[in-house]
Image (cartoon, helix red, strand yellow):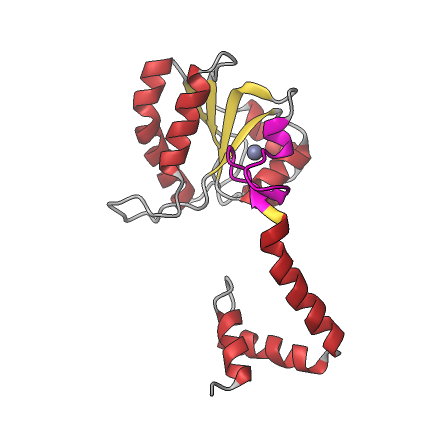
Amino acid sequence: MENPIEKLSNYFKEFPGIGERQAKRFVYFLLHKNPNYSKELGDSIVSLKNLIHQCPSCFLFFKGEKDQLCDTCNNPKTDKSSLLIVEKDADFENIKKSKNYSGMYFILGGLAPIITKETPTFLRLKELLKTIEDRAKSNTSLKEVIIALSLNPQGEHNDMYLREKLSPLKEKYKLKIVSLGRGLSTGTELEYSDSETIKNALSNRQ
Ligand SMILES: [Zn+2]
């Protein structure tokens, strides 16, 4: 039988940024905690998948029923003429929190590596194209797509890549495609940007 310490530590090793040593530290941390802590931790991991679902429109993880729209997509006050593309949930949360943008969002799910011929499976490119097409066709029609990726070589590469992929829809529906960037300094991560930086970046989009 597999050693339970090894077994649990192998799970932790799959977490982003966690190596062998840290994984082991987590296991020993749990061994020192009282049994209730482990039980509550286990329960909250199990209930996560039951309580949290992904919005079928913007792909945000939120507390709600399966196939239900998130508060932003469902809100009649959300500006349907604008769609902001971000890499991950944390970017969405931070821009939302800054209260500088009142339109729709789309979460890509990650960025493509710089050297790649094919679209990585985690990138929701097909879904993005469908969302844009559906929105552009609807009567509350989409006018502007804002690409809001972090300002580093990978973000810039993906910005260009998305512009290329969106180009047929841009022509077809006369969409304005802009990028955040001006107003952000090199290396900026949207996840950690303050409200003022986001405001500047949004007002300087081009
Ligand atoms: Zn949504």
Residue shown at 48% from the left, 75% from the top: 10
Residue shown at 67% from the left, 82% from the top: 31
Residue 199 visible in the snapshot: no
Residue shown at 30% from the left, 29% from the top: 164
How many callouts does the rendering have?
0
Image vertical order of residue 183 relative to residue 24, above or below: above
Q: Position of residue 86 (x, y in %)?
A: 50, 37
**Residue 160 figure quarter:** top left
Q: Ligand 1: which quarter? A: top right
**Residue 161 figure quarter:** top left
Q: Which residues are magenta?
A: 53-74
Viewer-closest of 116 and 14: 14
Task: Name, please, the residue furthest toward the left.
Answer: 117
Q: Is residue 132 left or right of residue 78?
A: left
Q: Position of residue 119 (x, y in %)?
A: 30, 43
Residue 157 visible in the snapshot: yes
**Residue 64 figure quarter:** top right
Residue shown at 75% from the left, 78% from the top: 34
Image vertical order of residue 96 relative to residue 142, above or below: below
The reply to whether the magenta stretch includes residue 124 is no
Viewer-closest of 181 and 117: 117
Image vertical order of residue 164 relative to residue 120, above or below: above
Q: Is residue 12 left or right of residue 31?
A: left
Q: Position of residue 47 (x, y in %)?
A: 64, 57
